[in-house]
Amino acid sequence: MRGNIIDLNEARRINDATFAEWTARLAPKSGDLLFAREAPVGPVVEIPEGVSIAPGQRTMLLRADPSKANNRFLRYYLISPLVQARLHALAHGSTVPHLRLPIIRNFEVVLPELKEQQAIAEVLGALDDKITANTKIAHTIEALGSAKFTRVGLDVEPSNEVVLLGDVFDLNPRRTVVSASPTVIDMQALPTTAPLVERWNTGLRKGGARFANGDTLIARITPCLENRKTAFVDFLNEGDVGIGSTEFIVMRSKKDLPLGLSYFMAVSERFRDFAIQNLVGTSGRQRVSAADLARHTLSPVDPFTLRTFGEWADVNLNVLGSLRGENRTLAATRDALLPQLMSGRLRVKEAEAVVAAAI
């Protein structure tokens, strides 16, 4: 679970026997809800269609009585601000807050008529469905880009002539932060299954990697490197320089090469294997250096082929940026409508007009 989103790319896989053992009492099905009761408390996700999931010990499976509640409405109810505040107030533990099972079982919910629940769920669900569709498009574009990059042949085992990665890309280029309140992102912000960062902040930070639009950020520490924490930077204002974690390596295409080339290089399987094999340090705190990455061997590719792919990458990374922007607007619309619908301050018909304009 990542916030109120279920991310199957980060799920641990189990065999059929273990799944049957874990779900012997109640087998989850599509539409059921997973409620996080620890680390952190509160997120609620809906199990998608056609997916088999075994809830972990930190989650609780919820299934509404269909004669009393709509499952999707129940999810929106539980993630609404007032209900989340109530849940957090009931949590125990200062180091790792958690909700005990009896508290969840006895948690009182106030539900409108079932017909009203269904109407609210449909209105808010339309926004979430559009976000899901955009996310699937984004994943398809990235998968296509990775396949195209493989066919380019840059990151294959050299047969005769050898090109070093440092000949094609700059690593940790020098940057000067100008803004008094620069854009800041930490390791948690780096995605593992998508090219673009979803969240960033501004603030004061002295140390850390400096980056600009067109750079690619690569986690250099275990286990973040193995988890493929990598992102293409496209969210800064023109001319701005951001500050990231000291555990980032910044990679940028050299002059005259399209900038998007660096991202697909960074997520190439052979490059990632090389980076992981060159981790050094004590167990659990191993890191790879920019100097080691610079000596990764590549095969020579003619400039025209590199530019052709890179231009495709630049165009489609811009498309991904547009999809992210649309998803942020859709999510903001949903989050603004949610408390108003739950409180009754806004009628469903009025919300439908807002949603229609957003979609």
Image (cartoon, rainbow, N blue to C red):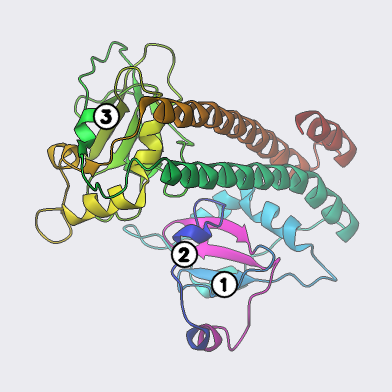
For marks 1 and 3, give the CA distance: 43 Å
Determine whether 8 is above or below 231 in the image: below
Would you say 28 lies left or right of 301 here? right
Q: Which residue is mark 2?
A: 11
- Asked if residue 27 is among those painted magenta in the image, a careful observer would answer yes
Q: State the residue at coordinates (19%, 28%).
A: 207
Given the image, on which type of amino acid does mark 1 rest? Ile
Which of the labelled discs sits on residue 228, or is there none?
A: none
Q: Which residue is mark 3?
A: 168
The residue positioned farthest toward the front in the image shown: 160
- Asked if residue 32 is among those painted magenta in the image, a careful observer would answer yes
Q: Which residue is at the front of the view, 5 or 111?
A: 5
Determine whether 317 is above or below 67 in the image: above
Q: Are marks 2 and 1 in contact (CB under 8 Å)?
A: yes
Q: Are marks 3 and 2 in contact (CB under 8 Å)?
A: no
Which of the labelled discs sits on residue 53, or is there none?
A: 1
Examine the rendering and report whether any part of residue 255 can be seen.
yes
Would you say 140 lies left or right of 215 here? right
**Disc 3 or disc 2, which is closer to the eye?**
3
Q: Which residue is at the front of the view, 152 or 316?
A: 152
| Quadrant of res 23 | bottom right
Q: What is the x, y in percent for residue 90?
A: 50, 60
Upstream in sequence: badge 2 or badge 1:
2
